[in-house]
Amino acid sequence: MAPRPMIAGNWKMNGTKTMAIDLAQNLVARSKAAASVPRIALCPPAALLETVSRAVSGSPIVVGAQDCHPKDKGAHTGDTSAWLLKDVGCTYVIVGHSERRADHAETDAIVKSKAEAALAAGLTPIICVGETQSQRDAGKANDVVRGQILGSLPSSATATNVVIAYEPVWAIGTGRTATPNDVQDMHAVVRETFAKGRTDGADLTILYGGSVKGSNAKSLMSVPGVNGALVGGASLDAADFWAIIQSVA
Ligand code: PGA
């Protein structure tokens, strides 16, 4: 069965406490007034997780973090464990975002260990995959994404305890989006790779990410195999983010 659509907002390293409360309250009011809403997750910076978690409490909106450490606790200055994220109210955690893979040299093995930690803590990991422009130009997009999935997916992953986000790196924050045909092809690659040897592939939530906005959400979200969006820049604007939410409601 096709999963219930999901829209997640990745705020990245943006926001203040005041802005976070305003944005979260605005979206809570809209979601409470709406006839139907998809799954909605807000992923603010770590320092704002508890604030946003409090602001959305009692509403259909939940909170996700942008990263976690593979270990439960210990001498890892500056890191946050999946257990603590769960403790402060998170439901999801993004792992393996291309910015973390690039800025922090995160390999598939590291991403996998983070996803395993998330599952052990009772969080749903949103595992990000996607090719760079040069990989796509070299005709390697399918192989790169297949390899990332095989390397990053915990062995205990099921269609309902993880989410995969396909985010072509060249479409992130650039204003360029993949064509509906490319998105359909790549989501099929993701689903086939996940589904190999299992029967629950149709139930997996696969998000598209990369310059999704209110103005292009309808056409991207109607592509077969797309179950929602991981939204960066546009998730910082309540009206634009709400338009994306409505495109799948
Ligand atoms: P963008 O970012 O929507 O700003 O392109 C998406 C993401 O990085 O998750």
Image (spheres, helix red, strand yellow):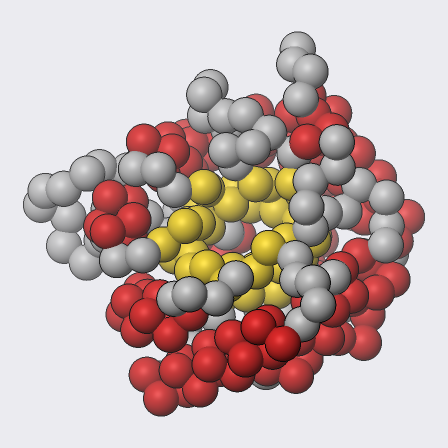
Residue 35 vertical position relative to residue 102 in the rendered view, above or below: below
The location of residue 23, given as percent across then percent down, is: 49, 82
Evaluate whether residue 66 shows in this view.
no
Task: Tell me the residue at 55%/65% (across/down).
Answer: 9
Task: Tell me the residue at 26%/58% (across/down).
Answer: 88
Residue 150 vertical position relative to residue 141 in the rendered view, above or below: above
The N terminus sits in image quarter: top right
In the drawing, does residue 181 fall left or right of residue 92?
right
Task: Tell me the residue at 52%/36% (across/down).
Answer: 162
Q: Residue furthest left?
A: 75
Q: Residue furthest top?
A: 197
The location of residue 14, given as percent across then percent down, is: 43, 77
The location of residue 201, given as percent across then percent down, is: 69, 25
Evaluate whether residue 202 shows in this view.
yes
In the drawing, does residue 221 fall left or right of residue 56?
right
Q: Quadrant of residue 40?
A: bottom right
Given residues 35 and 90, the one toward you in this image is: 35
In the drawing, does residue 91 fall left or right of residue 129?
left
Query: How many numbered dots are placed on residues in this image?
Result: 0
